[in-house]
Amino acid sequence: MKPTAVGAVALAVIAFVAVRGLIDFINKLVEQASAKPPALPAAQPRRAVRGRKTVAKAAAGLSAPEAVPSAPSPPAHLDASDLQVTRPARAHTRTQFRGSAALRQAIVAREVLGPPLALRPPRF
């Protein structure tokens, strides 16, 4: 077959359109890569904190010193012998939490519940 002028022109037009389409595609990719992401919506304002009346206290403190209140006195029906701070010696821990029973319960809990949250790997 002998190439004709019409065929050569058609082939040139097809090549030109293909190259032009490739250039447009590359330009579009470059524009998308350099485009800024869409702006985030404005953050909602936090709840307003009520102002404290520090100015009034400061002004009152500067004008006249107030009397310091004395330490409160203990109630009349209590004396120093009635006050008990520590746990009485007769209060024992339950037997299920002592000795080998405690170890058994700890092993069962570890198997059922898994490791403590502090020892688990982070979740993403």
Image (spheres, rainbow, N blue to C red):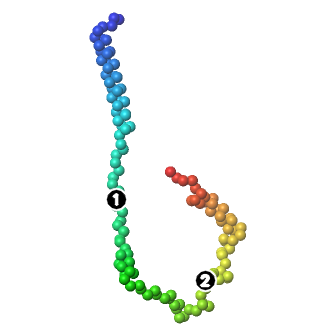
Q: Amino acid at mark 1?
A: Gln
The residue tagged 1 is 44
Question: Does residue 1 show up?
Answer: yes
Q: CA distance from mark 1 to mark 2?
A: 49 Å
Q: Give the image location of residue 93, x and y in percent.
A: 66, 75
Could you say which is closer to the camera, residue 106 or residue 8? 8
Q: Give the image location of residue 24, x and y in percent.
A: 33, 29
Label at residue 85: 2
Q: Is residue 120 positioned above or below 85 on the image?
A: above
SS label for mark 1: loop
* Residue drawn at (38%, 37%) of the image: 33
Q: Is residue 72 positioned above or below 101 on the image?
A: below
Q: Give the image location of residue 110, x and y in percent.
A: 63, 60
Image-based side of 69 in relation to 15, left or right: right
Residue density around tag 2, few if under 14, some if 14–19, many if 20 or more, within 10 Å: few
Residue density around tag 1, few if under 14, some if 14–19, many if 20 or more, within 10 Å: few
